[in-house]
Image (cartoon, rainbow, N blue to C red):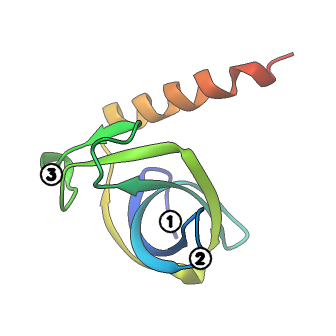
Amino acid sequence: MLSSGDVVLARVQFTDTLEIKKRPALVLFEEFDNVVVAGITSNLKMKGIPLSKKEGAIKDSVIKLNYIFTISKAMVYKILFHLSKEKKAIVFNELTKRLGALKV
């Protein structure tokens, strides 16, 4: 079973093409064999939350909270590593800020 904060290698589709590639992604949550993830890129020019090699990434990378999508659990190849409590808190706080406009 996948856990929130797992960084996985998964098959993901890019937003600008129909191409599907193996890419790292951050598990936000899993429900009924569907996994909601945030994309991770090694393009450090992109906005997002930094993720370093010291934290477990293969390359210095960025967690892209503007690229959240759902994949089937079957599309996950393996778990690469798990985020620290501190990094999970940063992700949570950023998501909460962005979703604040939904608050009634």
User: SS class of the residue under badge 1?
Assistant: loop
- First of labels 2, 3 by sequence position: 3
The three-letter amino acid code for the residue at tag 3 is: Lys
In the foreground, 102 or 3: 102
Mark 1–mark 3 contact, CB under 8 Å?
A: no
What residue is shown at x 30% (from left), y 51% (from top)?
43
Secondary structure under the numbered disc 2 in the rendered image: helix
Q: Secondary structure at mark 3?
A: helix
Q: Residue furthest top?
A: 104
Which amino acid type is marked by label 1?
A: Leu
Dots 1, 2 in contact, CB < 8 A: yes
Task: Report the residue at 15% width, 51% height from top.
Answer: 53
Quadrant (top left, top right, bottom left, bottom right) of the C terminus: top right
Q: CA distance from mark 2 to mark 3?
A: 25 Å
Which residue is label 1 attached to? Answer: 2
Residue 53, which numbered label? 3
Residue 37 appears in which quarter of the rendering?
bottom right
Is 4 on the left or on the right of 40, as rendered?
Answer: right
Q: Which residue is mark 2?
A: 73
Q: Residues within 10 Å of mark 3 (few under 14, many from 20)?
A: few
Give the residue drawn at x 40%, y 36%.
47
The image shows residue 6, relative to residue 50, as above or below, that is: below
Task: Report, in whole angstroms, how far the alpha carbon at label 1 lies from the one at label 2.
Answer: 9 Å
33 above or below 3?
A: below
Q: Position of residue 97 (x, y in %)?
A: 59, 21
Tell me residue 56's x, y (percent).
20, 55
Q: Tell me the kind of residue under disc 2.
A: Lys
| Disc 1/disc 3 C-alpha distance (Å) | 22 Å
Q: Is residue 76 left or right of residue 53?
A: right
N-term-proximal mark, 1 vs 2: 1
Tell me what residue is drawn at x 63 percent, y 58 percent.
69
